[in-house]
């Protein structure tokens, strides 16, 4: 059975009603709110994945339980999300906001400000709205994953590439999250192709016939060299001894 795409799963809780309510409460355009969430969702999922794939699973359990306490066990999380968005206008909602902020800080630690600033620059929402959206989105995302069963969190690791590829173009989460390998990593690796220059640098394989030709030429050159040196060395004159004439005396 094919696993559920976690990015699409959590996006479903931020429906049009939630987007309109967030835009009204935070005094931002709906388009910018949606753009900000497009960056916040993969950022939250990647931080959850880092906890899942490390020994810091206690943090994962902590934020999961806290998210359930904020949003409850209701099937439709949209009402709970809208309540958190409106909590800043409700004196009784301070506790909920503090819990949401606590989840965010525990999940992102020292990466919270870099990520919220990157999201704000990318989406056009104010820094305060970007941070508030992160506080709203984090518990909602965690709660939605929890609704799909305990094994859903285990899908974060095998779906890491899919999550990375969902990061919008122009949003630099690599620096904000402190990741060195945030890229389109699920593309099929290609076999390196050698250029002509590279091929020319490769050792040339000499055939048997070429070896024979080389040896014959080398032998001819050496033969000519030694023959020439033996018969006519430069600056050396070879004198022949005088011919000996034998006189025959005829006796008459």
Image (cartoon, grey):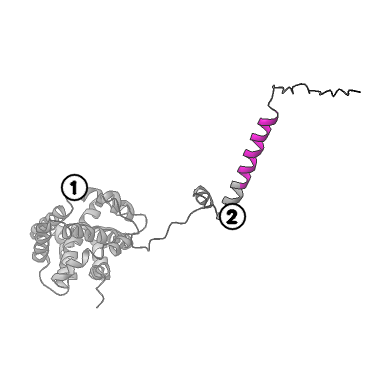
Q: Quadrant of the C terminus?
A: top right
Identify which residue, 203 or 227, lies in the foreground: 227
Residue 18 lies, in percent from the top left, at: 23, 67
Which residue lies under the disc numbered 1?
Answer: 110
Label 1 element class: helix
Which residue position holds label 2?
209
Residue drawn at x 36%, y 54% as measured from the top left: 170
> Which residue occupies the extreme bottom position in the image?
1
Q: Secondary structure at mark 2?
A: helix
Mark 1 residue crowding within 10 angstroms, few (<14) / some (14–19) / many (20+) = few
Residue 56 picture location, percent across and down: 12, 55
- Relative vertical location of residue 73 with respect to residue 244 in this rendering, above or below: below
Residue under the image location 59 percent in, 47 percent down: 215
Checking the image for residue 174, the label placed there is: none
Furthest-front residue in this view: 252
Q: Which residues are magenta?
A: 216-232
């Amino acid at each position: 059975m094919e696993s559920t795409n976690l990015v699409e799963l959590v996006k479903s809780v931020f429906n049009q009603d939630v987007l309109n309510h967030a835009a009204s409460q935070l005094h931002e355009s709906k388009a910018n709110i949606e753009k900000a969430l497009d960056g916040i969702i993969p950022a939250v999922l990647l931080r959850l994945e880092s906890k899942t794939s490390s020994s810091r699973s206690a943090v994962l359990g902590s934020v999961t339980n806290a998210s359930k306490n904020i949003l409850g066990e209701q099937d439709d999380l949209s009402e709970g999300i809208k309540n958190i968005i409106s909590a800043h206008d409700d004196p009784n909602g301070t506790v909920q906001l503090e819990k949401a902020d606590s989840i965010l800080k525990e999940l992102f630690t020292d990466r919270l400000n870099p990520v919220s600033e990157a999201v704000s620059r990318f989406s056009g929402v104010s820094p305060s709205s970007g941070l508030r959206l992160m506080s709203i989105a984090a518990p909602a995302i965690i709660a939605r994953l929890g609704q799909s069963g305990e094994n859903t969190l285990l899908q974060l690791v095998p779906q890491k590439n899919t999550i990375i590829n969902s990061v919008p173009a122009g949003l630099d989460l690599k620096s904000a999250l402190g990741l060195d390998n945030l890229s389109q990593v699920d593309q099929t690796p290609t076999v390196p192709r050698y250029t002509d220059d590279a091929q020319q640098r490769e050792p040339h394989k000499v055939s048997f016939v070429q070896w024979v030709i080389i040896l014959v030429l080398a032998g001819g050159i050496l033969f000519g060299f030694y023959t020439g040196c033996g018969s006519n060395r430069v600056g050396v004159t070879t004198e022949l001894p005088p011919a000996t004439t034998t006189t025959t005396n005829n006796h008459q």
